[in-house]
Structure formats: structure tokens, C-alpha cells
Image (spheres, rainbow, N blue to C red):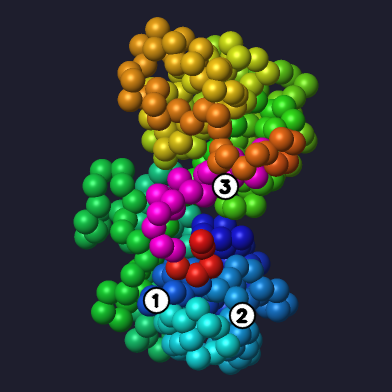
């Protein structure tokens, strides 16, 4: 569990009157395992959710969170990971605090805004005796473009500021064997997954328990069932190549962050011709990932799902394959 999902869980716990302590990476330096914005929750019953990097440093943070759960006092600490049994090095500044009903008000406002496509920031003043979060909508004193999320997690003076945006959405067109394998794989890495299929016996929520939405619609008119946007990741794997061509031809105009289609290199040549005849530009066609996913030699539906998930992770973090990555990425 990561990102906005952890904030939702914190809000649920607070709404039920249960204690929650959060540990947040405020800033990092060097090869730290997790960077600013990474969060770990300690629930009233001792359940731990999320991670700030693992290893001995996280064990120390867990102990401090248990102490904060008992006494309610906020804490700030710096973990020099090179001197606490972690050879990778790097350092993290962390804030630990018991959340309150004031946080629930801010969380509810932040989550509602993110769900409405109106992102903003949570802000926590570290110098306050009992630091609590407040929510600042995008545009309220923030330097953001229209429709653009605020800048990333950061410390401004003594205030930790963190953007809250809706989870990235993956739309899977086709709920066959590979589509079914993709849903839990992508949900596990904190994508919100929507499945779209034209078969009544396939497009059933019970077939995809990890999907946020399951849509029954026509591949010839996807706009009647769903609106795609620039932040979406689109995966096309319908039950036939004609339907694949129909979906790609429609989805390409939305310029999603990722558009991939399952098939061979021969299929790509056919699809390029068909989609070009329907008005797609050479640049739009070149952006289609076909064959889909990373080239891992995947064969089974589960293996193909892993290769697709790996590709989406690469796109999410904009890795170019040559850049050096901090621990634990390679």
C-alpha cells in the first residue's frame, strides 16, 4: 500500500475513532531506499502499513512510532543509513506524529479534491506543539499550471508540503487470460485498474476483484463507456485484432501517458497501416508500445502481466535505462 491509498486508510481509521501514527520521509540524501513522501502508518492495534525503506532504520522508526502511539508526542529524526547496518549509505529526515481529528478534516478535503481531479497539498508545520495537517487546494498560492499537480513533496521552512493526487489509472481493454492476470499485478503496485470488455459474461466485477471498475461496452465506441485522459495508462488486449485496431485508433487521440497493445511485430505493421488510415499521425503511431511490455521472454499470462507491470513502472518513473538509480532500484 502506497501513496493516496495510505491516506485513505488513515482517514478510515481516524473516522472510526482509532489512533494512527504516521512516519513520513521529509527529505533524503544520497542512496536512500525511499525518498520524500514515502509513508508508513502504525495503527492502534500495531498493524504496520507502507514502508520508509526497510532494514534496521525502519525497525528503529517502528519503535519510535510505537512510542508515539503511546505518548502522542511528535518526533523528528535523521537516519544515516550508512551507519545503521545499511551499506548503501544515504540519509533520511523523518517526521513521526500521532494523527488527530483535525487531520481527518484535512484528509477528507484532500481526498475529495483528488477524486474530483482538483489536486492540492497537505501541509504540516513541524514547529507546532501538536502538528496537524491542513489542505491547500491547487492554485491557492501554489505555482501550478492548469490541471497540473503541485510540485513534489518538500520542506518549505519548517513546513512539510505534500501533493495529493488521485492514483494513476490503468484501463485494460480486454478481460481475457492476460487481462485477468494484469489486474492484481497492477493493483499491487498502486495503479487504479479499470477493465473494459464487450462480453457480458466477462465484464463482471466478480471476475476482477482487484479492479476499481469493470465496464461493459463496445470496442467500436469506447467513449460511450469511458473517457480517457493524458494521465491514463491504456492496455489493449481484446479478443481479436480488429477490436484491438478499433480501440487503439480511438485511444490514440487521447494521448495517454502509455498506450500498449498485445501482439507480434507483424501485427504492429498491420496496425500501423490501419490506424494511419484512420487519421493517426506518425508520431502518435510511434508512441504505441507493440509488442507490449518489457522484453523478458514472457509466455504465460502471469509472465506477460509481469512484463507489462514492469514496463508501466519504467514509464511511471521515466527511467531511460542508462541512468543510475538509488537503492534499491537497478
In reply to whether residue 322 is colored magenta, the answer given is yes
Q: Is residue 10 above or below residue 76?
A: above
SS assignment at label 1: loop
Q: Nearer the viewer, residue 190 or 159?
A: 190
SS assignment at label 2: helix
Measured Cα–Cα span from mark 1 to mark 3: 25 Å
Q: Measured from the top left, where is residue 137 in percent x and y?
A: 33, 56
Q: Nearer the viewer, residue 198 or 137?
A: 198
10 Å neighbourhood of mark 3: few (<14), some, or many (≥20)? some
Return the residue at label 2. 55
Q: Are marks 2 and 3 in contact (CB under 8 Å)?
A: no
Measured Cα–Cα span from mark 2 to mark 3: 24 Å
In the image, taking residue 189 as reference, residue 177 lies left or right, namely: right
Q: Nearer the viewer, residue 29 or 300?
A: 300
Which of the two labelled residues, at mark 1 and mark 3, occupies the earlier sequence position?
1
Query: Which residue corresponds to the image point at 45% horizontal and 68% vertical from the top-left?
Result: 326
In the image, taking residue 145 as reference, residue 155 lies left or right, namely: right
Return the residue at label 1. 30
Query: Which residue corresponds to the image point at 61% horizontal and 85% vertical from the top-left?
Result: 56
Query: Which residue corresponds to the image point at 58% horizontal and 71% vertical from the top-left?
Result: 51
Q: Measured from the top left, where is residue 27 in percent x and y?
A: 38, 75
What range is drawn magenta here? 304-325
Q: Measured from the top left, where is residue 17 in percent x and y?
A: 64, 72
Q: Nearer the viewer, residue 289 or 197?
A: 289
SS assignment at label 3: helix
Measured Cα–Cα span from mark 1 to mark 2: 17 Å
Return the residue at label 3. 310
10 Å neighbourhood of mark 1: few (<14), some, or many (≥20)? some
Amino acid at each position: 500500500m502506497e501513496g493516496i491509498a495510505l491516506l485513505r486508510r488513515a482517514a478510515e481509521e481516524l473516522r472510526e475513532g482509532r489512533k494512527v501514527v504516521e512516519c513520513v520521509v521529509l527529505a533524503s540524501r544520497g542512496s536512500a531506499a525511499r525518498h520524500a513522501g514515502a509513508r508508513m502508518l502504525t495503527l492502534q492495534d500495531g498493524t504496520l502499513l507502507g514502508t520508509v525503506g526497510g532494514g534496521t532504520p525502519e525497525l528503529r522508526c517502528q519503535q519510535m512510532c510505537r512510542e508515539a502511539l503511546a505518548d502522542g508526542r511528535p518526533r523528528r529524526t535523521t537516519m544515516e543509513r550508512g551507519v545503521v547496518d545499511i551499506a548503501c549509505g544515504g540519509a533520511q529526515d523523518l517526521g513521526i506524529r500521532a494523527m488527530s481529528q483535525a487531520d481527518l478534516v484535512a484528509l477528507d478535503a484532500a481526498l475529495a479534491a483528488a477524486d474530483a481531479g482538483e489536486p492540492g497539498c497537505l501541509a504540516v508545520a513541524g514547529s507546532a506543539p501538536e502538528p496537524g495537517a491542513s489542505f491547500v487546494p491547487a492554485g491557492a498560492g501554489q505555482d501550478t499550471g492548469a490541471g497540473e499537480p503541485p510540485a513534489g513533496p518538500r520542506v518549505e521552512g519548517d513546513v512539510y508540503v505534500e501533493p495529493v493526487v488521485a492514483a494513476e489509472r490503468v484501463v485494460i481493454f480486454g478481460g481475457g487470460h492476460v487481462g485477468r492476470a494484469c489486474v492484481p499485478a497492477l493493483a499491487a503496485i498502486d495503479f487504479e485498474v479499470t477493465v473494459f470488455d464487450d462480453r457480458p459474461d466477462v465484464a463482471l466485477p466478480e471476475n476482477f476483484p482487484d479492479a476499481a471498475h469493470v465496464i461493459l461496452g463496445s470496442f467500436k465506441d469506447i467513449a460511450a463507456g469511458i473517457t480517457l485522459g493524458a494521465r491514463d495508462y491504456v492496455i489493449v488486449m481484446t479478443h481479436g485484432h480488429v477490436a484491438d485496431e478499433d480501440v487503439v485508433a480511438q485511444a490514440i487521440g487521447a494521448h495517454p501517458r502509455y498506450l500498449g497493445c498485445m501482439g507480434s511485430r507483424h501485427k504492429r505493421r498491420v496496425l500501423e497501416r490501419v490506424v494511419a488510415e484512420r487519421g493517426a499521425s506518425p508520431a502518435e503511431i510511434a508512441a504505441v508500445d507493440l509488442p507490449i511490455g518489457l522484453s523478458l521472454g514472457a509466455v504465460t499470462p502471469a509472465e506477460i502481466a509481469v512484463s507489462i507491470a514492469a514496463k508501466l513502472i519504467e514509464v511511471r518513473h521515466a527511467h531511460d535505462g542508462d541512468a543510475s538509480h538509488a537503492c534499491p532500484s537497478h
